Amino acid sequence: MGQTPRSSRAKRYAFPALATAAALFAPVLSGNASAQLAPAASSSAGASATFALPPNAAPNWIFPIGTPGHLAGYNIAVQNELFVPLYNYDTSSGTFALDEKVSAAKPPVYSNGDKTVTITLQKLKWSDGQPVTSRDVQFWYNLVKADKTQWGNYSQGQLPDNISKFTVLSPTTFRLQLTQAYNPGWFTANQLVYITPIPQQAWDRESAKGPVGNFDMTTAGAKKVFSYLVSQSSRLASYASSPLWRVTDGPFQLKTFTTSGYVTLVKSSSYRGPEPARLSSVTLEPFASDEAEFNALRSGEVDYGYIPTADIPQVGAIKASGYTVQPWVGWAISYIPYNFNNPTMGPVFKQLYVRQAVQSAINQQTIADVIWHGYAAVGYGPVPQTPPSSFLSKVQAKNPYPYNLKRSKSLLASHGWTSGPGGVLQCTSPGAGAGHCGAGIAKGTKLAFTVLSESGSTETNNMMQYLQSTLSSVGIGLSVKYEPLNQVLDQTSACKPNQASCSWQGSFFGTQGSWYFPAYPSGEQLFLSGASANFGSYSNPAADKLIQETNVSSSATAMQAYSALLAQDLPVMWLPNPDYQVSAIRSSLKGVLQNPGASFMQIEHWYVSKG
């Protein structure tokens, strides 16, 4: 889950604030033979490739404005092949950098003390022959502005709130007036990357049979258009036949899309941009489990797959069968959010000492080394622990809550929790103040909760069993309910205690990392009060202030302060961050870029070597 920033081969725009983020990724790419881009004379005419999707993870959203629960990386990866985003980042240069060739616009120009942004579009065309214009960007902006609370990437005060005026200067140039000065590096990498020009001349309608107009120019009209497009994007079985999704400007077009997750993209005959597709088609193939995918890989049925960590001993055999094997390290964090608004456990989760007791009962190094076989990095806070960066605070790096079962037991006992039936602790000293369980916790409340967890991964299953065991040893009961990833995401949303949707207590969707960051790993989407991806409704005024500071300051100090506070305040249960995957790529398939941001497709780069 999470964000997938992008970029490619052409001239790069160097943001001072991103210099550290770009430099730190260079080691990730060393030895990556598959990351070579196709030479100019190379040809893959008629060639195709098959990509293995993660277990129980299938694309389920095509509209380039994702609603909550539809922000998974594979959704965004497919969208980006059909609809070119305003800005894209990738690692084709050896660093994580912005690139023009796979972006819809030239680098932004900041002026007026970083309060004004002027953007000029590249020369792209829609598949219906119309040019991509500033009006198409304005169309996206108007829909998001009118329906921001339904946009999955919305955080209060962020895009679109931080744009005070959108002005079309010409068919190819527009200007954004910002509400205040922002760090240009942050604003480009963490805000402008969400914008995607969408075909106003084809989509600006309020119903399937209604005319195309300028309905988005009023709030009421924009809401109706947005509602219509969301309803169409909810009809997965109609994607391949719908005339809406045939109007594209990307290097690929959609050929097939099944509700089970099979997706076939074919080279677009109408694409007129600088980075045309080299393959004739690419198929995304879903699998119900790691075992099913690995069986397909061993039999040579996929060109780009992965080796489950439990099967790492078979790396030699996979290499011998014609694959290149390499780990895919992610710029990400993994965690289980607590639902602070759950009517039963919310008051318990709001007690810092409870969260400290839980965190102290988690031996991350053992999980990383034994369960993930070394293909995971410990993570003690909101900033990616690896690769190393100047964003990481010393507090987070040193782990403020090392594994210590004695400390966990002491914390709970000193706050009025005593052993009950089955060894599960229960509150025998209700109320606030020293020696009591805490405000809102009734006498007899059991210290037990349920976690929704994505199914299909042996490592995830083993980690959940390990957590059940260690938490049980200090008197905390943990139940696990396994479901496919999309279902877990659908049930994990911010809510109010009186809502039926607030029944979830904890959620894990991080088998391949819970959240992948743009180049600038700030937390406005995850931990800002009211943020759309703040699933557990965590709220801390001190954290809000620090997050806002990271958005305007280019100094690493702001990020370090944010890193330290949330490592200590525990808005979620921090867990080791697994590598996105250990990839197995057919040796003849070249141009594959394993971005730390997990933008796993970018298939316009892929080609088949003739040699």
Image (spheres, helix red, strand yellow):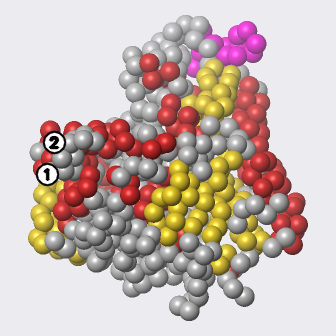
User: Which of 191/123 is in front?
Assistant: 123
Residue 589 falls inside the magenta stretch: no
| Quadrant (top left, top right, bottom left, bottom right) of the C terminus | bottom right
User: What amino acid does circle 1 point to?
Assistant: Asn
* Residue at point 25%, 71% (across, down): 131
Tell me if 217 is positioned left or right of 339 in this view.
Answer: left
Q: To which quarter of the image does residue 170 belong? A: bottom left
Q: Count the numbered circles shown.
A: 2
Residue 216, can we see it? no
Measured as percent of width and height from the top left, residue 598 is found at 55, 61
User: What amino acid does circle 2 point to?
Assistant: Gly
Start-end of magenta stretch: 412-428
Residue 416 falls inside the magenta stretch: yes
Tell me if 580 is positioned left or right of 301 in this view.
Answer: left
Q: On screen, 411 above or below 461?
A: above
Asked whether the residues under the numbered discs 2 and 1 touch, taking CB atoms below 8 Å apart as contact, a structural biologist would say yes
Distance, label 2 to label 1, CA atoms, is 8 Å
User: Which of 263/606 is in front?
Assistant: 263
User: Which of 579/248 is in front?
Assistant: 248
Measured as percent of width and height from the top left, residue 471 is found at 71, 29
Q: To which quarter of the image does residue 427 belong? A: top right
Q: Which residue is mark 2?
A: 221
Q: Which residue is mark 1?
A: 214
Q: To which quarter of the image does residue 36 belong? A: bottom right
Measured as percent of width and height from the top left, residue 33 is found at 68, 80
